[in-house]
Image (tube, rainbow, N blue to C red):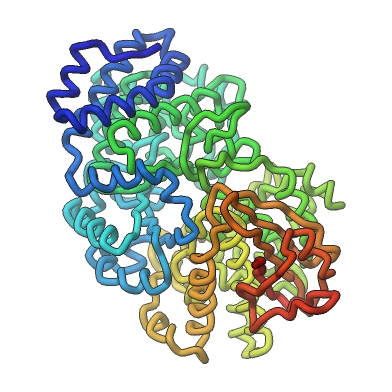
Amino acid sequence: MFQLDPAAQRTVAQRLGPARADAFLARFEQLSFDIAGPLEQVYGAVTDTSRLATELVLDALHAAAQRPEPLQRLDRRREIDPGWFQRSRMIGYVCYADRFAGSLRGVQQHLDYLAELGVSYLHLMPLLQPRDGDSDGGYAVADYAAVDPRLGTMADLQELIAGLHERGIALCVDLVLNHTAREHEWARKALAGDPAYRDMYLVFPDRTEPDAYQRTLPEVFPDVAPGSFTEVPGLGWVWTTFHDYQWDLNYANPAVFRAMLGVMLSLANRGIDVLRLDAAPFLWKRLGTDCQNQPEAHLLVQAFRALTRLAAPGLALKAEAIVGPDMLVQYLGGHERYRPECDLAYDNQLMIMLWSTLATRDARLAGQALLRRRPAPPATAWVSYLRCHDDIGWAVSDEDAAAAGLGGFAHRSFLTDFYAGTFPGSFARGARFQDNPATGDARISGTAASLCGIEAALAAGDGAELTLAIRRLESMYAVVFSFGGIPLIYMGDELALRNDPGWRADPAHAHDNRWMHRPPMDWAAAARRADPGSLEGRVFGALHGLAQARQGLLALRSGGTTEILAAGNRHVLAYRRAHPRSAPFLALTNFSDGPQPVDAAILAQAGLHQPRHVHSTAGRLPLGGRTLELPAWGFAWLTTG
């Protein structure tokens, strides 16, 4: 068992004082296994892990001693309520700071807008200083200690955080774990010949090992960045999973882990509430594999969580892991036994199933895929979303497709064609992204409003079709808000912002059509949000209504369970939410162009013996008959008591 020696314990008392030292040591007792165990498994063959663990705990102690008083108070509240991020009032919003308001100071000027929408969790897309020029959308970080100067300064960020905390809004910021920009100080020192920094990256003298690895490595960006290695004159062949200017870190070197822990602790002390761990599945490389989701990657995240929790117990970690559902739940600690890793993870599968169901008007595949997946550990939460800054990849397994009577490859191809707008009768206005001729796969770009038919309806001047398209958007968000987890609104969806027609005008973006769904915020459109007759007013009102209805429903708190129910109608997705302290909750969503009936027996099946209406597309759903009738592209939320 890992313990601190008397000298280290005296250091804790000296640095923190009696009360805080007691709390720190109590946390250490709780977390010591999650610190020492992973470190021994990962680094036991290369270093004295007892000494390494002690050094890391002292790093955490140093950060705890420097933690500002307001954050210490926040820590105490969150230690009392460790499920603070699970509350049903947690409603998220994600945006690029510059696209939203120009700068961090601009974001601060619009906090009342976010509060009006019901937001209590704000994710600002990459803020840390990237390299100049191409930067993979800001994910090639040149300095973890500085904010992108185009957005402001670290002082501006801390002022923004204070304003968010005053309104009860938590801030999530991206932390790129897998790689740095080649302009980062560590990379520059490696290139200058410092062997300690050279060992922080994966560098090979010739192509022998890279060629052996490359045989089993998939390409992330085959169009613009084929291969996974780049020759750097004067250094060697550098592992570059994403782009040639993003150098993969060597986590087999314990110095890398310690350096990245220092970055995490420093950001936590700035007041950041959630760190989104970008590219977490890529942290460990193993010959003969795809070098993703390796056991060591999970062990590293477990140790990161324990050490950050030791210094800053109010900090939460979120996994950016776009992998299959069985692999994804492991980043929440869902292994063969619970092993704490991240607190949050993206529910990528729910997002994909929503778009699949919208295109097919058939909920059977979604029901099959969502029914068989493993639940998240009770202490964690999904982050549920409909759109994000990235493209949509059709991670529909052949197994799930076959169970729904579909061919996996054919269905994925159909979805690409449908959302690119090339399938006959499609209402979508998206674009293909990263066509891979070797596999036949492609992904999709486009805003939610353009993909669900709002753009096409406006272009056609068809008011009836516009109403249906708005209902599609609202009903899909109704699932996001009620399926379990923190619902995340992508910037502009609340105003039905469509694809940016001028995305190609910026030479830095012209090669990447994902910028079509990253339009700048339209504040003139936002000014119309109070007009119920405007498009913006209709959509803002719909999402605001979801937020208001959700906040009072304990069944929608994370940590509960979601059970897929048989609706007896292939167009209807039905599920029951339950929490140990709540009445059961039933959600019904109609994915079709016309009204659809559901047998009222589903109310008893869901445990709603005295059903009552909570929220729905339009008006109250009549509950007295033998069937429940959902309007076209409509939803209903019901509970009991």
* x and y percentages locating residue 105 in the rendered image: 22, 65
Q: Position of residue 160 (x, y in %)?
A: 24, 59
Residue at the image position 47 percent from the left and 64 percent from the top:
490
In this view, the residue in front, 548 or 199, is: 548
Tell me the quarter of the image containing the C terminus: bottom right
Residue 86 seen in this snapshot = yes
Give the percent coordinates (x, y) of residue 429: 62, 71
x and y percentages locating residue 55 in the rendered image: 26, 18
Determine whether 36 is above or below 132 in the image: above
Identify which residue is drawn at 84% across, 47% down: 403
**How many tags in the picture?**
0
188 left or right, relative to 136: left
Q: Is residue 302 left or right of residue 402?
A: left
| Nearest the eye: 285 or 275 | 275
Give me the residue at 65% from left, 56% from top.
577
> Can the viewer see residue 187 in this picture?
no
The part of the image, by quadrant, that contains residue 508 is bottom left
